[in-house]
Structures are given as structure tokens and as C-alpha cells.
Image (cartoon, coloured by chain):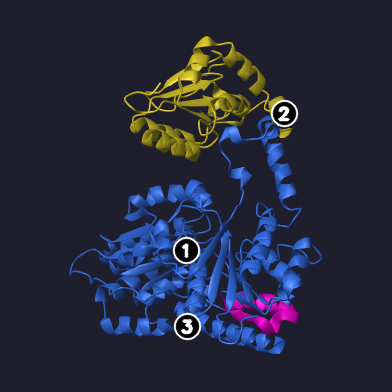
Chain colours: A yellow, B blue
Amino acid sequence: MTTDGHPCVLVLALGRDPLPAAVTEAAARWEAAGSPLITITLTPRASLTPTSRQVALVARPLGPDGADPSTAGAPRSTARKALRRLHLDPVRWPAAFLLLVSPRSRRLLADADVVLAADSASVLLGWALALRRGEGRVLRSVSGVDRALRRTTQI
Amino acid sequence: MPAKGARPHVLYIAWGFPPCRSGGVYRAMATANAFSQDGWDVTVLTIDRDLWERRTGADPALEQRVDPRVMVERIPFDWPVLEDDLSRWPPLRALAPRAWVKMRTKLDQIPFPEKVYGPWRRHLERAADRIHGHHPVDLVVATTNPQVSVTAALHLAERHRIPYVVDYRDAWSLDVFSGRRLHPEGSRVHTWERRALTGALEVWFVNEPIRQWHRAAYPAAAGRMHVVANGYDEPAKEIDGRLPGSALRFTYVGTITGKVPVPELVAGWRRCREQDPLLIEANADLYGYLGFYGAAHPALTAALDTGREVGVRYRGPVSKTRVSEVYAASDALLLVLGTGRYVTSGKVFEYLATGLPIVSVHDPGNAASEVLAGYPLWFPASDLSPEAIAAALRAAARAAAAADPAARTAGRAFAERYSREHQLRPRIGALRTAVSARAEETT
């Protein structure tokens, strides 16, 4: 879904934790450089940039600002903390399932030029996608996306 | 062994070599060049360019400064933890990323007790054998860190009795910031280190406090330990000279990590701007990479944001080839260093070569203070409080505004003892003598 020669960046943020500041800063940079930006999230969260699109797989839970409080850093439940200590992100399997049964999300994923798996809950799905899309298309870091964008723009 | 009159062959092992842009690369490049200029055949064994170009950032201009007679052998080096392309991740990593990283860290240390770098040992040893088979090596110089570099030196020493030098630069077992021992006696690290140091023809350190620590820790090798300070590569350009009435320009050049007390500098700068009319319009320009891997420490980012309001400007990295222009446009230099009595840093020597006023913003007990003691334009902060830093900045501002040519000439004369050539020449001469003597013994 390249727009006017600018590659489309899709940010997968399927977890319920706040994203690192590096991601929001980079998102603003990519958009300023002309790349359309889409975020797929499990629950609604604050937009990465004022103009980027967001697709939430589940409409709830919502805080007063219309976003899931957990994505803004509200304390996690004891059960969630325990699962995370075991390195088992509790939401990654249901999130992956919900995304795969959503035709709209699948279409967005298929159309994106570069995908950032922005949190650990997005890694498994991102990896499965990377096996189909090949090298340099699904990245785990902001600097990886920067490199991929440079390459895509040069091509 | 070199035949009589033949050029001796030194194998120089350096993980970081141009186009790498890290701070330690200048010493590696200067050492390889110095051996070559002294009439040695030099083979540098280093890693593929991929890591610099894809991950940490490269400085291609640096490669132009390597003596063209130096042969550079590049061998693979993997850093899988840094791999961010998910198509290259193994299934286990995708399923349990944190567990995979923990497991990988343990596996990396099986061949050699050093995280990340351990697996490089087998590439190094194979390459050292291949190079020696092709062009017999008379001396190995292994520069650390990473410490795994010593494995190739030990390998050739054990197989072919080739003498070797360990250029330690900083330290392995000593934490240069806290001064405490990082690896206890009896640990694998201690065993490797003792083996590497006791078998070495020479061991080099960057300053006297680090050498003293190692002399006490490894007395069997004490007599072969030397200080080879980092030094500066070439005299600085003539300073542009300040236009009367123009704002003073203070400059910092170096990697800006979380250990560098930038928040303290900003607080002191703010204080002196409030107190001294000479500094109201002055600027402090900070040049260098933010962190070693392109990510800034959060406290640092916040300090730089605050500093912008009072004339502290982050100007980004500057190539080594342009550094002299930056110095030439400065009125005074800021030496901002992490705390530690064993910390010198390489930039102190470059700073000295300019003959400009130098403001020290670091613990007075740092090894850098020993280097600077006696420099006529040195203005050290007595501690890291805003008042002490402001006082040092004010004194330096007076000297910078006066721009006394005689003081600068005296400063440059003081610095001559720290030229890179002055540091390396005696050691390379001694090594040539040792290699020649060994050749004569063998024949």
C-alpha cells in the first residue's frame, strides 16, 4: 500500500503495556517523512500520532479518555504479573487469533510494506508473518524499520 | 622468525577497526599504522563490516586513514541477540524470546567466559592459524575489549611459541568506574586472565592507576606491564580566534553515555549563566553519539532538553576527520567524564593538543586529573555541584576571553609528551628488539 512512493508502516501492538517512547517518536518521524501509518492493537490505546489510523481488535476495556488504562501504564493484575514472570505474555495467543479472524486486519497486514512488532505480545504473530513475507519486512526494532524504509525508498 | 633484514610480521587483533566508529577504534588504527610505519608487515584481524553498517553506525572516512600497507582480514562475527529481522529468528526465540536470550547468553560463554563475544573464539583461532600458515607471524598484539581477542594470541603462543602483547586499554576484572573486582579469584575469567597476562611479552594499559591495580593482582607479570596512554594523533589546527565581542563557544566531543554527568554540567552551566555576564550569550555545543548503540539514556535525554533553554546544544556525532575543525571553532573545551579513579578517556589528549582552556567536569580523583595536572589552562571543578562547576566555567571563560597566545603555546608544549607517536614508539622499538633477539636465538 505504497502511497506516492512512500512505504506504508504497520505497527503491531497486541500487548496491553505502554509502548516505548522510541516507538512513538519514530512513528512521528515516519509519518513526517510521508509514510502512511497504521496501528493494530488488541484494545484501544492512545494514537501513535494525531493522524495515524488505529484498528483495535477488542473495543474494551476503556478508561475515561477512550483508551485501555493498561496501555497507559495502569497497574497490572497479580495474575498477569505472575504470567509475565514466567515469560508467558497472557494476551498473545488470543490477540493472534482475533487478528487472524478479522478480514480487515488481515488485509491491512497484507498491504503493509514494513511491519513493526512493537511489543513482546506481537512477536509470535510477527514471526509467522515474517516467514511468509521474507527478509527485511517484519522487524522487532525501530532501527530495523528505519533500515527497511531506507531500502524500500531506495528501490 | 624473520630472516635477517626481513620485515617482521605482526598480527594485530582488534574487534573494533575502521569503519567502526567507537572511541577505542582510534587507538587500534594508530597502533596498526605505527607498526607499519616502523617497517613491520601488519595483518589486522577484525570483524566483517556488517555490524557497523547495520547496527552501530560506521564512519567510512576513518578507513582512509589506515596505512595502505596494512592488510585487513575480516572474519564473521554474529550478534544474534541484536537481530531484529523476525524472519531470521529461530522458532524457539519467537515462542519464548526472553528465555531464548537467557539460554543464548549461557551458551555464548561455553567457548570463552564473555557474554556475546565467546563464540568469536573459534573464528579467531582458525583465522590466526590460516594467517600464520600463509605468512609466518613473529608477534601477536591482541587488543581488548572484547577480551576474547586474547584467545588467538594464546592459541598461536601454545602451538608455535609466538610471543604476544595484550593491549588491555581498560580492564577485564577491574570495574574502572567503581574500582571493585568484577570476577572473583578462581573464576573462569580469573583463570583466563592470569594465563593471558603471565604468558605475555608485554601488557599495555591506558593509565598508571590501572597498571598499578594489575601489578598488585598479577605480580608474576608486573615487570612486563607498561602504560601506553591513548595520546593524540596529530597536532590540532590553529584556533580560528574569537572575534571581539562575540559569544564564547564551549565544546564537548565524545560518546555521551549515561555515565557522563551531563545533567550536572547543565545545572552548573545554568548557574554560571545567571551569575556571569561573560557567559550570558555563551553556548556549550556537545558533539558525539548518544550511547554506544544509538539509544540515549532517559536522564540524558531529559538533561539535553533542559539544556537547550540555556544554550547547551546537542550537535550530533562528528567524524574524526572533522574533529579538528570543531576544535578550531571553539574557545574552551568541556571534559565531562564518568566517575572513577581509573577513568582517563582518549579525548583528554586531543583536548590537550589544542592548547585551549579545558574545564574538567568529573570526579577530581579521575585518572584524567593526573594527565592534566600542570597544564596551564586547566580549570577543574572541585566537585560535581552546580556551584563548583559554575566556578570552573567562569574561570575558563576569563581565560578564553583573554585568548593569550603565550598561554596556548605553553599548553601545546605541555601536550607534546602525549602525542600517540611519543607513546607508541618506545614500545614498538622494544618489541622489534625482542623479536630480533628471538630470531637470532633460533638461528
On the image, numbered disc 1 is attached to which residue?
A: B385
On the image, numbered disc 2 is attached to which residue?
A: A83
- Would you place residue B153 above or below residue A4 in this image? below
Q: Residue furthest right?
A: B186
Residue at point 50%, 69% (across, down): B27
Q: CA distance from mark 2 to mark 1?
A: 44 Å
Residue at point 75%, 70% (across, down): B159
Q: Nearer the viewer, residue B43 or B194?
A: B43
- Would you place residue B290 above or below residue B207 in this image? above
Q: Along the horizontal axis of the image, is B49 left or right of B202?
A: left
**Please, what is the dominant secondary structure of the magenta stretch?**
helix
Residue A148 picture location, percent across and down: 46, 35
Whether residue B293 appears in this view of the structure is no
On the image, numbered disc 3 is attached to which residue?
A: B422
Does label 1 or label 3 sit earlier along the sequence?
A: 1
Residue B402 picture location, percent across and down: 25, 77
Quarter of the image for the C terminus of chain A: give it. top left
User: Label 2 marks which chain's residue?
Assistant: A
Q: Amino acid at mark 1?
A: Ser
Give the quadrant of residue A53: top left
Q: Amino acid at mark 3?
A: His
Discs 3, 2 touching: Cβ within 8 Å: no
